[in-house]
Image (cartoon, rainbow, N blue to C red):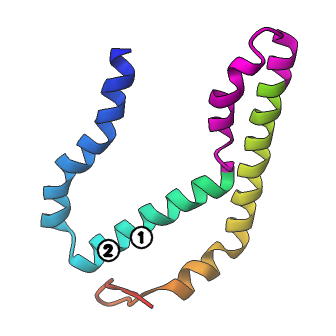
Amino acid sequence: MFWFTLMGFLRPAIKIFLLPLYLIYLTPSDYGLLALVGIFSSIVCICATLRLESAVRTYYFDFNDDHKRLWSYVSQIFSSIVVLGLTTYFILLVIGPTLFLSLIHISEPTRQAEIS
């Protein structure tokens, strides 16, 4: 139980400890771009998995007495997550460059990002 608590606090703690480095080495537009990438990756993660792993935690005990149904349920959730993730990957592989170039304009000489 201690490890789950520690890992739960580790992710926000890393962000807090890295904040001074971000403020020293990144310009405000770079820091804003980093925040946008974080937001976008969170949204894609939710859309790609549909948070099906939460369903496993929720309904695990409904199938606890029947191990065959439990195995079937967990394998269906896992398969769905893999298929959704691969589908999202290939969609972003095809339309990702166009999408990102239309949202974020980077000028070559200064490498400053502009968000449209």
Q: In the visual, does 109 lie left or right of 82?
A: left
Magenta-colored stretch includes residue 54: yes
Q: In the visual, does 67 lie left or right of 20?
A: right
Residue to which mark 1 is pinned: 36
The foreground one among 21 and 3 is: 3
Magenta-colored stretch includes residue 105: no
Marks 2/1: CA distance? 6 Å
- Picture quadrant of residue 56: top right
The reply to whether discs 2 and 1 touch (Cβ–Cβ < 8 Å) is yes
Which residues, given as a range, are shown in magenta?
49-72
Amino acid under label 2?
Gly
Quarter the N terminus occupies: top left
The residue drawn where x is 59% and y is 60% is 44
Residue 87: where, in percent of width, then height? Answer: 77, 56
The residue drawn where x is 20% and y is 49% is 16
Q: Which mark is residue 32?
A: 2
Q: In the visual, does 41 lie left or right of 84?
A: left
Q: In the visual, does 3 lie left or right of 50?
A: left
**SS at badge 2:** helix
